[in-house]
Amino acid sequence: MDTTTATEARYSRGAVILHWIIAVLIALNFAAAWVAEDMPGPQKMQIMGNHKAIGIVILVLTVARIAWRLTHRPPPPSPDLATWEVALSKVVHVLLYVLMLSIPLGGWATHSAFAGGKPVSLFGIVNWPGLPMAQDKVLGETLGGAHGTFAWVMLGLLALHVAGALKHRFLDRNSNALKRMWFGG
């Protein structure tokens, strides 16, 4: 494969950077939610404060990632993929984008319902405005339940996404599979 073809088969640097930053933040947010479950009140509130802030950052970066994708053509699917693999990949990616938007939006709405529209502190640096809603514990619990359910769906899709990448690399022996969304040349 010549250099031009290899470069064209890779995602752009901006796409790679946004992909991995969002991936790390999603992993941190899952970890924060799981750790906070068993914490006492004040510690739990601090961890959940960071969880909310990271969620807002994920939301903003996801919007940036979508804007990037709309303005920078992704590489074509690898020619050695079966039709069903290309179709499944597209479905999983669309669902991941939907969840990367809806989960933070749901968390923001959950916070806003419990806090009566008060802002979310972004790491004590700046306040992100709350959604304009009255305090409603029942609505907050409903939104929080949906937020959690969507997070579990995302976890399943992420497992499928990673399994697909590993399958292509190790079972199909496609050494370019992981390089497409990694740093460097």
Image (tube, grey):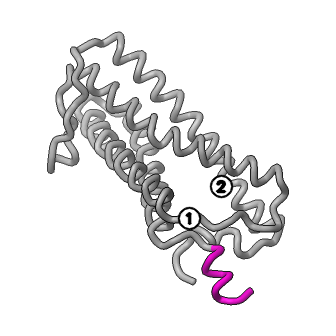
Task: Give the residue displayed 58% in from the left and 68% down from the top.
Answer: 181
Q: Toward which corner of the image does residue 78 lie, by quadrant? A: bottom right
Q: Which residue is mark 1?
A: 73
Q: Is residue 47 magenta?
A: no
Q: Which residue is mark 2?
A: 162
Q: Are marks 2 and 1 in contact (CB under 8 Å)?
A: no
Type of the residue with mark 1: Arg
Residues drawn in magenta: 1-9
Q: Image check: 124 left or right of 52?
A: left
Q: Toward which corner of the image does residue 106 lie, by quadrant? A: top left
The local crowd at label 1, few if under 14, some if 14 to 19, many if 20 or more residues have their Cα within 10 Å, is few
The local crowd at label 2, few if under 14, some if 14 to 19, many if 20 or more residues have their Cα within 10 Å, is few
Residue 45: which disc?
Answer: none
Residue toward you, 44 or 106: 106
Residue toward you, 65 or 30: 65
Q: Toward which corner of the image does residue 140 lie, by quadrant? A: top left
Residue 35, percent across and down?
41, 40
Task: Give the residue displayed 41% in from the left and 23% down from the top.
Answer: 144
In the picture, the quarter occupied by the C terminus is bottom right
Residue toward you, 50 or 142: 142
Q: Secondary structure at mark 2?
A: helix
Q: Image check: 83 left or right of 16?
A: right
* Residue sitting farthest toward the front: 71
Residue 156, percent across and down?
63, 40
First-in-chain label (2 vs 1): 1
Residue 9, percent across and down?
65, 74
Task: Give the residue displayed 53% in from the left and 31% down from the top.
Answer: 150
Q: Is residue 8 magenta?
A: yes
In the picture, the quarter occupied by the N terminus is bottom right
Type of the residue with mark 2: Val
Q: Secondary structure at mark 1?
A: loop
